[in-house]
Amino acid sequence: MNVSTAVLAVAGLLAGMMNALAGGGSFVTFPALLLTGLDPRAANVASSIALLPSQAVAGWAGRGMAEGAAGLSLRTLLIESVIGGALGALLLLATPVSAFTHLVPWLILFATLVFIWGSFFRRRAGDAKPLVSPRVAVALQFIISVYGGYFGGGIGFLMLAALTAVGVAVRAAGATKNALAGVMNIAAVAIFLVESKQNWTLILVLGIAAMIGAQIGVLLLRRVPETVLRAVVSLTGIALTIGMFLRE
């Protein structure tokens, strides 16, 4: 096993554990793929493909708790998530590598701020009165879906914030978020597979390790304080943001 493979295996394990416990796995997989020599756009695509299986499983497992929001059916939200995810993927592939490289630090900064806000400051009341109308809910989910297909960092907290803002209980919002993220990423990955070439060795190593890590994360779920995990993810995002800006 060479150094790159070992780095990816460790990154995949950590990402799988983080996603199962607190989220933020892409903060580990993205820089690990950059270290293998991939450019930022290719690393973003490879990370999305590698992490898809565990995301799809999470969405399927919690499908019974998923529900619609703001008078919209779950089917409507799923359909617009598929469309938005596919559009985001097409926008990513249409973005020149040089332009995306300059955009990455800002995307990571945004994702990190969203993660920190969602981890430590987001409103926790699950049965609060809806704050936005159905039309606004549709627009929010579509915009989030496009962002998810394009980059995806912090996507879970963006959706949790939107769903709780329209009155969905936190537990149901978490399940709904997983279902929407799953179909969103499936749409994006389908575009990536058709429209771009992949390094399957890197993706398989990362993906298999992430699935193993997810199983370990489930076992640790009741033993590791979630606040500590979220703090670690937040610090990782801050460090990665600083590092990417220094590379500019």
Image: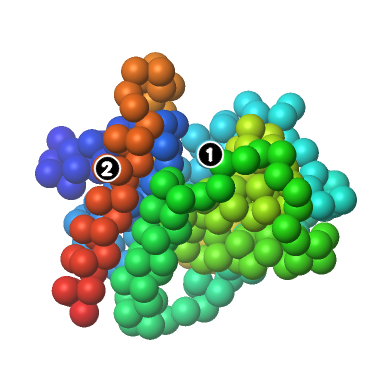
Q: Quadrant of the C terminus?
A: bottom left
Report crowding for label 2: few under 14, some 14 to 19, many 20 or more residues within 10 A (C-alpha). Answer: some
Q: Amino acid at mark 1?
A: Gln
Give the left or right position of residue 3, taking residue 88 as reference: left
Mark 1, residue position: 55
Q: Distance of mark 1 from mark 2, alpha carbons?
A: 21 Å
Whether the residues at callouts 1 and 2 have beta carbons within 8 Å, the answer is no
Mark 2, residue position: 232
Q: Quadrant of the N terminus?
A: top left
Image coordinates for residue 108, horizontal then vertical, percent: 36, 64
Q: How is the image coloured?
A: rainbow
Whether residue 144 is visible here, answered yes or no, is yes
Among the 4 quarters of the image, the one containing residue 198: bottom left
* Residue farthest along the left direction in this orientation: 3
Q: Residue at x 35, y 41 (%)?
A: 230
Label 2 SS = helix
Image coordinates for residue 17, horizontal then vertical, percent: 36, 31
